[in-house]
Amino acid sequence: MMPRAKLMQQKRDAAAELLSARPLPEGGVWARAARKAAVERLQAMGLPSKRDEYWRYTDPRRLTAADVENADQVDTSDEVPIFEAFDRVKLVFVDGVFDAQASDAPELAGVEICTLAEAARADLHWARDAFGVLEARGQDPVPRPLASLNTAYATEGLLIRVTGKAEKPISLIYRRSAANADAMTHHVIRLEPGAELTLLEDGPVAARYNQVTEIDLAETAVLNHVRAQGRDHARAGATHLFARLGAQAQFKSFTLSANGALTRNEGVIWLDGAEGSAHIAGATVGDGAFHHDDTVFINHAAPRCESRQVFKKVLRHGAVGVFQGKILVDQVAQLTDGYQISQSLLLDEDAQFLAKPELEIYADDVKCSHGSTSGEIDQNQLFYLRARGVSESDAKMLLVLAFLAEALEEIADPDLAEDLRSRLEAWLKRRA
Amino acid sequence: MLEIKNLHCELEEDSEVKILKGLSLTINPGEVHAIMGPNGSGKSTLSYVLSGRDGYAVTEGSASLEGADLLEMEPEERAAAGLFLAFQYPVEIPGVGNMTFLRTAVNAQRKARGQEELSAGAFLKIIRAKAKELQIEPDMLKRPVNVGFSGGEKKRNEILQMAMLEPKMCILDETDSGLDVDAMKLVSDGVNALRDAGRSFLVITHYQRLLNHIKPDVVHIMSEGRIIKTGGPELALEVEENGYTDLLAEANA
Ligand SMILES: Nc1ncnc2c1ncn2[C@@H]1O[C@H](COP(=O)(O)OP(=O)(O)OP(=O)(O)O)[C@@H](O)[C@H]1O
Ligand SMILES: [Mg+2]
């Protein structure tokens, strides 16, 4: 074992090396200040290492290496694009760079949309008090250096402020162009009291990407977030969702992931006001050289809140799934209702699932449960289906979809849920 | 219809455990046969071996459906060929809706037989009518397969599947167990409605009561992996009255 101080020094040296190779982007006063603060945070905590408590199951090197590996794009030209049937405001990024030409006009009643590039040049912007703020808060008690790196360097992203009930979803579409682009996007989303929004995200983003989304929900605001991550096999991506909820706010976030050499999705949620509700869910299918990591922290900091984490992974041919999830209940958070389930379906003996479910509770009157399981296809169920005439491959697919159903149920809009479910079915059929 | 000759099987994982030990049975089209026999005599195993469940190794003998070798086929091929097993313990499948399951099954079999798939509308019409006959609530069709169903509901659901799939050879493994008197009548009516000259039944049961409703042409007594006696409906009455002791002694004599 390396002594702690020496390890810390190595992590800091690695951060210093990365920082010195890269000047901070230009920008106005507030943006520069936010970036400098992020650099300081990063310098203090250093880059992630496999020895860090929450990086034990996932090797972060590919996410911080100087060179980006090429990632071939999955050909999806014969597929109907995801969310196609839904009327929405489409905002397009190519290799992580906003493409106004390819996008709809960023206009929607009750919603202000502005690019980070524009806002950073301005001297005053509402995002001044938000950009990097939740990311900074999310560094305690567990460091998330990739998120600080993002705050320091991201020049692309959107600042979205919602004051009413948005009449259609905002849909962020991430397209790719270059074989080895390295993308950083940073979105800040603020919902004022009573505001409502559905936020959609889909697409392969870039060969490597680092995305941060900071979400601030005022009291009684409602945000439904549905994300479908691209299926490029060799991609390496890290995402962070930081969300704080005021009283009676509701947040639902669902992520569908397929393939990807390395994906780390972190979620950090604070229930700051009474009676808030946060659901975060994921359905993942991995086949082959695939490593997918969900790391979620839910902080109950107010009474009578409810949270649910539902993560399901179907793995085969050497795919590795990781789940690290924590429910932290503050002393004041009486009558908390916290639920967490993480399950994997291992389709062969090469697949692997690593789980670290945690509860940390300081209030005495709470209801919290967590469970984690790893299993195989149930042979009795498989035989029952086959005895009714369903082919073995179709029967397995039905059982895989059934396994993932509990996660898909976390999508608030049943039509969106059905869109993702039918897509999953088509992907599974293709690889059957 | 179904022809079983000198069938022997043992457990795949333990060849010391021999379950079927030379079972022979012929069922002609349109006939109803009943099998009775003590617990553990191998009745369910016979139904599993015929329908193709993993875990059993056939070491000797044959089984054919309308002349086609059943033992060579995958379970789904046997189903498409017209074999149906109503399970002694129907399996719960969380996350798969009963309706989705049945439509998938019906259309898979139609496809395997070169028939056109049923449209969602046509399917819905048929299943609603058949469910009603079996007094299966529409709500049960929407729920996941057998999840939270009572014992009797599970058995009725098996008969509904049978009615939808219209198989040629139906094996019912203790479909009467766990049924109240009224449900027994419903299930029997469901079975009787399907009886015709081209369809055969093999009814496994412990109780003569069911055979009052579903009148068998032939009754077999099974013990230790073999048919030890074959006769008419009166054989079932004899079992009901005297149990198996005399029959077993007679067979061993
Ligand atoms: N998979 C298995 N593993 C171990 N033993 C088995 C297995 N399948 C069957 N057996 C054994 O084979 C014998 C026959 O079992 P089977 O279930 O066929 O009996 P049955 O006649 O249907 O009995 P019952 O009337 O109780 O339903 C029993 O002794 C049973 O324990
Ligand atoms: Mg049995």
Image (tube, rainbow, N blue to C red):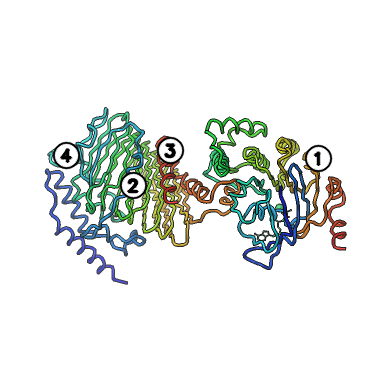
Where's residue A136, x and y in %? Answer: 25, 50
The reply to whether residue A280 is visible in this rendering is yes
Where's residue A139, x and y in %? Answer: 28, 53
Chain letter of the residue beneath label 3 in the structure image:
A
In this figure, which residue is indicated by the disc labeled 1?
Answer: B212
In this figure, which residue is indicated by the disc labeled 3?
Answer: A418
Q: Nearer the viewer, residue A271 or B183?
A: B183
In this figure, which residue is indicated by the disc labeled 4?
Answer: A119
Q: Sequence-wise, which precedes: disc 4 or disc 3?
A: 4
In this figure, which residue is indicated by the disc labeled 2?
Answer: A229
* Dot 1 and dot 4 residues touching (CB under 8 Å): no
State which quarter of the image contains the C terminus of chain B: bottom right
Q: Identify the secondary structure beneath mark 1.
A: helix
**Given the image, on which type of amino acid does mark 2 rest?**
Gln
**Given the image, on which type of amino acid does mark 3 rest?**
Glu
Measured in 3D between alpha carbons, the distance from the residue under mark 4 to the one under mark 3, in whole angstroms, is: 37 Å
Measured in 3D between alpha carbons, the distance from the residue under mark 1 to the one under mark 4, in whole angstroms, is: 84 Å
Q: Nearer the viewer, residue B32 or A167?
A: B32
